[in-house]
Amino acid sequence: MRAHISINVTNLEKSVAFYRNVFGQEPQKKSATYAKFDLKQPALNFAMHEAVEGRKTSQVNHLGIEVQSADEVIRWQRDLSDRGILTLVEENADCCFARQDKFWIQDPDGNSWDVFFVHEQLPVVGAEPPGAVPKVGGCSTAAKCC
């Protein structure tokens, strides 16, 4: 089993270049207004449609990839930094009622992604997590997630 996510983007070429860099591979399918990455690791069918003919760009809180270890978070972060993708690192963060190591990236349309490892679940107490996610390149590591 694997998840499928399809988003609408402003500029398909810019988004394909960004995600090609993130995932380290070419899209499996591509046309003038559509691209799909058929990923094995992480297991994800990820597609994009260019926002044409009145289609609006996607608006989500954030997207994420949960990995199996803190070392894997570091590997992902190092690989993306080596590819020139700016990251915002949060270590030992209390986020979404869990203690996590993570980092954030943003695509050309401002969609935020986190790559994270959960060290432990925390009690669900108080208010819901904040609605805003950190803006990569425009905030400090003191920003709160989710």
Image (tube, rainbow, N blue to C red):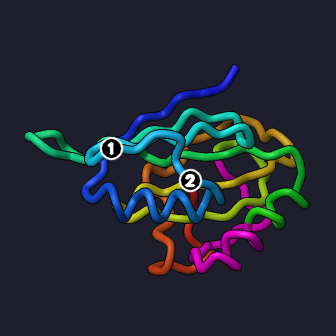
In the image, 74 versus 144, the foreground residue is 74
Where's residue 36, x and y in %?
A: 47, 40
Give the labeled residue for mark 1. 31
In the image, taking residue 111 as reference, residue 67 lies left or right, namely right
> Vertically, is 51 above or below 136?
above
Left or right of residue 47: residue 52: left
Determine whether label 1 and label 2 are within 8 Å by CB: no
Query: Residue drawn 77% across and 73% down?
Result: 78
Secondary structure, mark 1, is loop
Q: Secondary structure at mark 2?
A: loop
* Sequence-first disc among 1 and 2: 2
Residue 65: where, in percent of width, then height? 67, 46
Badge 1: how crowded within 10 Å, few (<14), some, or many (20+)?
few
The amino acid type, in three-letter code, at marker 2 is Glu
The amino acid type found where label 1 is placed reads Ser
Horizontal and vertical percent for residue 51? 21, 46
Using residue 15 as the reference point, say whether residue 83 is left or right of it.
Answer: right
Image disc number at residue 125 = none
**Relative to the observer, which residue lies in front, 146 or 29?**
29
Find the magenta span and give its range. Answer: 77-95
Residue 34: within the magenta? no
Q: Residue drawn at (70%, 19%), measured in percent from left and top?
A: 1
Q: Quadrant of residue 100?
A: bottom right
Q: CA distance from mark 1 to mark 2?
A: 13 Å
Q: Residues within 10 Å of mark 2 (few under 14, many from 20)?
A: some
User: 71 or 91: nearer the eye?
Assistant: 71
68 left or right of 38?
right
Against 121, residue 87 (above or below) is below
The percent coordinates of residue 69 (x first, y second) are 89, 51
Residue 26 disc label: 2
Q: Residue furthest left?
A: 54
